Structures are given as structure tokens and as C-alpha cells.
Image (cartoon, helix red, strand yellow):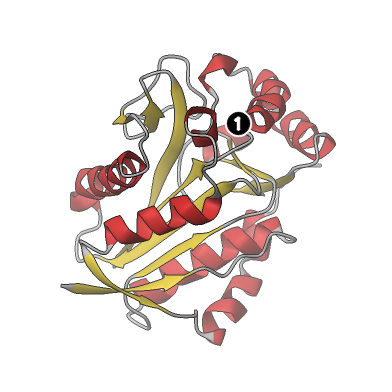
């Protein structure tokens, strides 16, 4: 069984550093300095913008809308459209060494989606893989509840020698996602249905980050030998050098 280092360090007060740490971890895995790493943590409030968002004329306005609603703004590591994280969500970032990262895209998406679905089912949630019509940051590997509301989004970043699979699970306070995405998506001219936002606690009152995190760890332990650990100082130092890449580049 493959060994996986589980890291829970978070940087809620510094949104760009949070993303840069995932970026630096991916680089370290690609260089063979560290083995597979799953970073599973509670982030601060932030809107993570994708490459397509940055190319849109409304991007500066979208960034301002995020900030006005109390969210940080960052440029995300993986692909996709603007996604929301906050204190009642769980962010995950899985970095694995790959000899042919492109060839394994579908397998990695399928694996992480199944991990999340199985974890949520163990908590009594009717979790399903698939895009809900009109969902925010749409993707065929999203996880929803009952085919109605999106509760997990995921994307990938590939580099030579490694892959990063990252995303967010919404545990509670789904309305905060809706409220910030309405002005953000308006600025980006993205057509979506705000009713597709939701949270696990809406369907299973009493769920919290700790319970969902433990369910995810239990499920992924079927695939890996999970060992709690910390990232090397060299990774954190490299992350500091990557900060500018993840700060919004707006006038």
C-alpha cells in the first residue's frame, strides 16, 4: 500500500499563502523531495479565481466584489471558474508523483470523487457524483446531495512528474457561498443558478468540519497508508517565493 503524508496545516489569515503552499508542495513532490501528500485543512474565507476568470474584462470588478463581501481573493492552482472557501468548508489538496500525469487525469478525478462520496455516505448523506444543472464552477466530477445541490468541487493541476487534485467540501454555511458568488459571477458574466449552492449540514444537522474530515481520512486510508506529518520548512520557504503568482493581478 502506498504511503501518504497527511498534513492539516492551514493559513486562514493569508489566502495567497494557503494556495502557494499547495503549489510548493506539488513542486516538491515533482522533484522527488517528498512523497505523496494530502493536505486536508480548514481555510479562511476566500474566492479562488481560475484562468478563464482572469481573462474576462470583469475580473477586476469580481475581485472587488469578493473583497467587499469579506472574502480574500486568490488565483487558484487548479483549473475551473471562481470557487469559494470559508471557515465551514474543508479544503483538500492531494499531490502525487506521476510518470505520466496527463494519462491519469480521469482516474484521479474518479478516485477523489469516490472517496468523498463514500465518506459522506458513511455520515448518512445521499451523496452522488455528477454536475447539477446550473451549478457554480461546474464539473462532471462534482459531488452533490440528492442531485440538487453541489457540496464538493474539484480541479487538477499537472506538472512534469506530479499531479495536484484540489478542491473544497462545503460542510455548513452554504448561503455564504451563494451570497458572494452572486456579485462575483455577475461581474464575470457567468450564468448559474444560486439554488445549486448548499451545505452538508443542511441535510444532516450536527455535521461539522471535524466529523467530515475524519470520514474522509477513514475512507482514503483504504487506498493509502496514511501517516500524519508536517511539510518541510523548505516547502514553506518556497511557498513564500510563489506568493505573487497567486495574488490577483488587477489594476
Q: Say which element carries label 1.
A: helix
Q: Nearer the viewer, residue 214 or 8?
A: 214
Give the side of residue 194 with respect to residue 60, left or right.
left
Instruction: Tell me: residue 5, above or below residue 70.
Output: below
- Image coordinates for residue 199, horizontal then vertical, percent: 53, 32
Give the side of residue 127 with respect to residue 138, left or right.
left
- Image coordinates for residue 137, horizontal then vertical, percent: 49, 30
Which quadrant, please, contains the N terminus?
bottom left
x 58%, y 77%: residue: 236
x 65%, y 45%: residue: 86
Q: Which residue bears the numbered disc 1?
A: 174
- Image coordinates for residue 150, horizontal then vertical, percent: 46, 28
Give the side of residue 76 with respect to residue 214, left or right.
right
* Residue 55 seen from this side: no
Which quadrant, please, contains the C terminus?
top right
- Image coordinates for residue 58, horizontal then vertical, percent: 71, 26
Residue closest to the far front: 206
Q: For residue 140, which quarter of the picture?
A: top left
**Total numbered labels placed on residues in the image:** 1
Q: Which of 70 and 157 is in front in this view?
A: 70
Q: Nearer the viewer, residue 247 or 133?
A: 133
x 80%, y 34%: residue: 69
Give the side of residue 249 with respect to residue 125, left or right.
right
Q: Which of 187 and 12 is in front in this view?
A: 12
Q: Residues within 10 Å of mark 1 (few under 14, many from 20)?
A: many
Q: For residue 120, which quarter of the picture?
A: top left
Amino acid at each position: 500500500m502506498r504511503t501518504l503524508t497527511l498534513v492539516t496545516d492551514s493559513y486562514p489569515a493569508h489566502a495567497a499563502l494557503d494556495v502557494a503552499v499547495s503549489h510548493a508542495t506539488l513542486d516538491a513532490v515533482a522533484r522527488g523531495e517528498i512523497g505523496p501528500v494530502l493536505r486536508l485543512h480548514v481555510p479562511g474565507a476566500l474566492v479562488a479565481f481560475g484562468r478563464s476568470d482572469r481573462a474576462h474584462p470583469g475580473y477586476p470588478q469580481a475581485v472587488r466584489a469578493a473583497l467587499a463581501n469579506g472574502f480574500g481573493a486568490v488565483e487558484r492552482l487548479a483549473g475551473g471558474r471562481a470557487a469559494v472557501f470559508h471557515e465551514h468548508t474543508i479544503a483538500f489538496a492531494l499531490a502525487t508523483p506521476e510518470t505520466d500525469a496527463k494519462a491519469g487525469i480521469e482516474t484521479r478525478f474518479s478516485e477523489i470523487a469516490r472517496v468523498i462520496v463514500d465518506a459522506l455516505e458513511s455520515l448518512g448523506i445521499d451523496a452522488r457524483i455528477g454536475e447539477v444543472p446550473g451549478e457554480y464552477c461546474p464539473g462532471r466530477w462534482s459531488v452533490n446531495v440528492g442531485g440538487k445541490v453541489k457540496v464538493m468541487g474539484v480541479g487538477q493541476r499537472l506538472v512534469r512528474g506530479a499531479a495536484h487534485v484540489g478542491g473544497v467540501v462545503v460542510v455548513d454555511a452554504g448561503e455564504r457561498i451563494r451570497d458572494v458568488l452572486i456579485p462575483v459571477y455577475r461581474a464575470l458574466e457567468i450564468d448559474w443558478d444560486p439554488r445549486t449552492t448548499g451545505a452538508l449540514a443542511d441535510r444532516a444537522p450536527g455535521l461539522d468540519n471535524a466529523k467530515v474530515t475524519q470520514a474522509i481520512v477513514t475512507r482514503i486510508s483504504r487506498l493509502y497508508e496514511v501517516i500524519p506529518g508536517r511539510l518541510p520548512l523548505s516547502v514553506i520557504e518556497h511557498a513564500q517565493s510563489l506568493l505573487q503568482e497567486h495574488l490577483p493581478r488587477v489594476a
